[in-house]
Image (spheres, grey):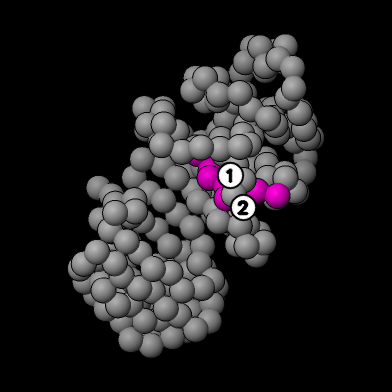
Amino acid sequence: MKACLIVTGGKLDLAFARSFLEKESFQKIIAVDAGLEYVEALGLEPDYIVGDFDTVDPSVLERFRRLPFIVWEQHKPEKNETDTELARNRALTLGCSRIVFLGATGGRLDHMMGNLHALYACMQSGVEAYLVDRQNRVCLLDADRTFTRTSLWGNYVSFLPYSEEVKGITLEGFKYPLQDKTIRRGEEVGLCISNELTGDTARLHFDEGILICVESCD
């Protein structure tokens, strides 16, 4: 499994990032614009640097330009894709089967929402993809999932409809179970928020649609 780390320019807790990277292994690293500053702070060597470079410190850019074996992909600021989306596209062309985004959840809400939508193409390509920060791990689901207590990001699991509706949701092994329930965007929002496992494993089943899955800790 080829895994790719994409480091973007949102808010990133460096202490958390260091702890996370001690437990994870990535074959490819892509720095996105100001995310290059985090890459430097973390002592990482990126394989690709992607963006229009309108927010990264120019001195950081200059230091990395002296290093060999880095592929630079510079884009004009006037473009249809976000820098993170372009990095996502690069990760997909590299044949990565797992993509983790760091620095993709804090800061501007429009960027965070755009990063959430960046997960969609990953899901369509059969690629496991997550937005990760100290408190949350976020992904999109289009198929059943079994959750184990030992691998959860925190104590809480929430499901929200990414598609207009998600049909036939059944939750087993959760504190708040469901049976063959259809949920829709903007309706009964609290129905699948802040659920918890009652045992070592829990099962999500649904018939149709796409879910946003958020694993969270306080």
Estimate how packed mark 2 is, as few (under 14), some (14 to 19) or many (20 or more) residues with alpha carbons within 10 Å: some
| 73 horizontally vs 10: left or right | right
Q: Which mark is residue 97?
A: 2
Are dots 1 and 2 in contact, CB under 8 Å?
Answer: yes
Q: Earlier in the sequence, mark 1 or mark 2?
A: 1
- Vertical placement of residue 94 versus 172, above or below: above
| 83 horizontally vs 140: left or right | right
Looking at the image, can residue 39 be seen? Answer: yes
**Front-most of 55 and 121?**
121
Tell me the distance, in whole angstroms, between the alpha carbons under discs 1 and 2: 6 Å
What residue is at 21 percent from the left and 71 percent from the top? 175
Q: Position of residue 195 (x, y in %)?
A: 27, 66
Q: Position of residue 132 (x, y in %)?
A: 45, 45
Q: Which mark is residue 3?
A: 1
* Amino acid type at mark 2: Ser
Q: Mark 2 falls on what kind of element?
A: loop
Q: Main secondary structure of the magenta part?
A: strand
**Front-most of 199 and 137?**
199
- Vertical placement of residue 111 versus 151, above or below: above
What residue is at 67 percent from the left and 61 percent from the top? 125
- Give the residue furthest to the front: 1
Magenta span of residues: 95-102
What residue is at 43 percent from the left and 62 percent from the top? 213
* Amino acid type at mark 1: Ala
In reply to whether residue 99 is colored magenta, the answer given is yes
Q: Position of residue 169 (x, y in %)?
A: 40, 81
What residue is at 63 percent from the left and 42 percent from the top? 84
Q: Position of residue 183 (x, y in %)?
A: 42, 80
Q: Mark 1 falls on what kind of element?
A: strand
